[in-house]
């Protein structure tokens, strides 16, 4: 039995069940709306399509790297952790994950644990966040 305060790493937990695609998509929608709002401060997101994408990559780098959750993930009660040990993935891997997510296609190629190609390449996985 695992301790709820320190759950087993997803890679070694035979009972690991990933969150639904709906929760993941909901988190992405919340994050995208925030990115559109933030990018309005320095660019026109309609004319400069790169601006919200850049903000999304930076948002993922900061929030996932330091807190294991973006604001959208917080709202939908999911988090992104290291596959091997369940810890934070760090800023560099979070930036890479964000950049790969921005390409869209890697996120669509999922395995049985709903780990997209962007997750597998960065050694991460999306899990349900513990209740507080």
Image (cartoon, rainbow, N blue to C red):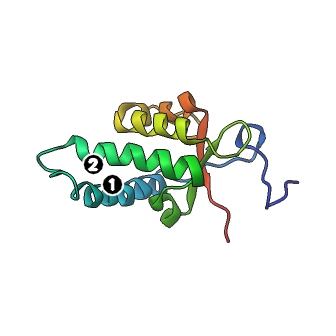
Residue lying farthest front?
42
Of tags 2 and 1, the one toward the viewer is 2
Question: 15 or 125: which is nearer to us?
Answer: 125
Q: Is 129 left or right of 117, judged from the image as shown?
A: right
Tell which circle, 2 or 1, labels the residue nearer the N-terminal end: 1
Considering only vertical position in the picture, is 77 above or below 120? below
- The span from disc 2 to disc 1 (Cα, nearest Å) is 8 Å
Q: Are marks 2 and 1 in contact (CB under 8 Å)?
A: yes
Q: Position of residue 108 (x, y in %)?
A: 41, 35
Label 1 neighbour load within 10 Å: few <14, some 14-19, many 20+ = some
Q: Quadrant of the C terminus?
A: bottom right
Label 2 neighbour load within 10 Å: few <14, some 14-19, many 20+ = many
Q: Name the secondary structure under disc 2.
A: helix
Disc number placed over residue 52 in the picture, else none: 2
Residue at 52% in and 40% down = 94
Q: Name the secondary structure under disc 1.
A: helix
Q: Position of residue 70 (x, y in %)?
A: 49, 56
Disc number placed over residue 32 in the picture, else none: 1
Question: 1 or 37: which is nearer to us?
Answer: 37
């Amino acid at each position: 039995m695992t301790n709820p305060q320190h759950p087993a790493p997803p890679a070694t937990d035979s009972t690991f069940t990933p969150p639904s695609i709906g929760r993941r998509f909901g988190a992405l929608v919340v994050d995208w709306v925030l990115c559109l709002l933030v990018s309005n401060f320095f660019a026109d997101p309609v004319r400069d399509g790169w601006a919200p994408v850049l903000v999304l990559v930076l948002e993922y780098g900061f929030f996932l790297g330091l807190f294991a959750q973006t604001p959208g993930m917080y709202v939908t009660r999911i988090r992104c952790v290291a596959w091997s040990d369940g810890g934070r993935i760090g800023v560099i891997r979070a930036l890479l994950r964000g950049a790969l997510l921005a390409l869209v296609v890697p996120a669509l190629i999922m395995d049985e644990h709903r780990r997209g190609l962007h997750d597998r390449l960065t050694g991460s996985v999306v899990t349900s966040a513990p209740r507080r």
